[in-house]
Amino acid sequence: MKIAMITPGYLPVPAIRGGAVEVLIEDLLIGNETDRNYDIDLYTVPDKEIDEREYRFTNIIQVNIPKTTKIINGVMNQVYKMLHRKKWRTSYAREVVRLLKKKSYDLVVIHNNLMAYRDIYEKTPNKKNLIYILHNDINEKDENHVILAKQIGKTAKAVFAVSEYTKNQFLHVAQCGKADVLYNCIDIDHYTQKIDAEDIAKSRLRYGIAPEDFVFMYSGRFDIYKGVLELIRAVKMLDDKNIKLMVVGKSWFDTKERSDAYTQQLSEESDAIKEKVIFTGFVNPTDMPKMYRMADCLVVPSVWEEPFGVVALEGMISGLPLIATNSGGLVEVVDEECAYIVEKEEHVSEHLAEAMQKVLKDKPRARKMGENGYAKVMKTRAFHKEAYYSIFCEKLGI
């Protein structure tokens, strides 16, 4: 079976610059290398390091966007805006369409790009074989998103969502069609690899973490919806001198952009407790197991409805107790056996600080929560990278 795999168009696949969605797409490619249910054409934004990855059954097509395409689409978007048209063009989607017109596929799998789906459906022959994988929530306040969701609901051969929450939200907004859940996953072997205790201790010292320090950890992109600012404010409420907050990540994964306004706000907010807050910057996914081993508790402080929460799985398989907000699909991953779950609507910093105090005061319970989280991930097949490709094929009926 010949299929086209359309990436979102923001970061490259293979996931050499990070990105949860991009890692999951790469997991599908890796699974197909063993079972070869498909011959895949993968469409992705270009990157000079892509050529270093080789696949036998995947042909990687780097989508280079001509300047003329960008100019034309910019002008058209201004026209749509002036005419109050509920429409928007993206240069990536338009260039993908141009390439798809030259080929025929049994299936076209589109990841998390509503406008790419619209353009592929309307401008290529692939009208009856489109699969949409929804990695994020549908913004029902955005009329354009609602229109596109309804189109997908009416026309897609299948829709997969990353959680029951995102599935139900999609069906609510689309008001038609059907959807199934394809949970996100992680590489169990990667996060359970043996790491020398002395190596971890040396790494902690390099980051200025003393042996007696208790380390709370945040991992992910810097975004107002991820709650990093609220977490820093929570740390400021704690009197304990032997705590550290290790903030792993940056505003947009492994990119070279300068610090944005939100990142600057995080820096300014943490200035009063700079001896307690460690900004590591972007960490390559290959080094993340060590980062989790350096920590004592993972905090997932999302202040929006989290579609799923891969980072929670990573913390759980690393044996860490969690503090997480009552957020979207996140509570399908964690439960009260492995996490303190706090409300996010009001006074979230206070709620986070209270949960952090509980972790500090009852460390035996925290250790037990870490054990419970590890056990939950280990027994849940849908969370395992090794099963992700198989479940994807099962749901397609292959």
Image: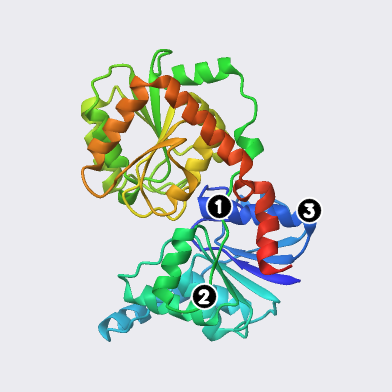
- Mark 3 and mark 2 lie on one chain; the one further toward the N terminus is 3
- The residue type indicated by label 1 comes to Asn
The residue tagged with tag 1: helix, strand or loop?
Answer: loop
Give the number of the mark in front: 2 or 1: 1
Whole-number angstrom distance, CA of label 3 to CA of label 2: 29 Å
Q: On the rendered image, what quadrant is the N terminus found in?
A: bottom right
Q: In this figure, which residue is indicated by the disc labeled 2? A: 117
Q: Which label number is shown at residue 34?
A: 3
Give the structural element (helix, strand or loop) at label 2.
helix
Q: Please rate how many residues cluster around mark 3, counting C-alpha atoms within 10 Å: few if below 14, some from 14 to 19, many from 20.
A: few
* Image marks 1 and 3: residues in contact by CB distance under 8 Å: no
Amino acid at the residue labelled 2: Tyr
Can residue 71 be seen by looking at this rendering?
no
Q: How far is the residue under mark 1 from the one under mark 3?
A: 20 Å
Q: In the image shown, does 252 or 195 lie closer to the viewer?
A: 195
Quick check: 317 above or below 84? above
Q: Which residue is mark 1?
A: 184
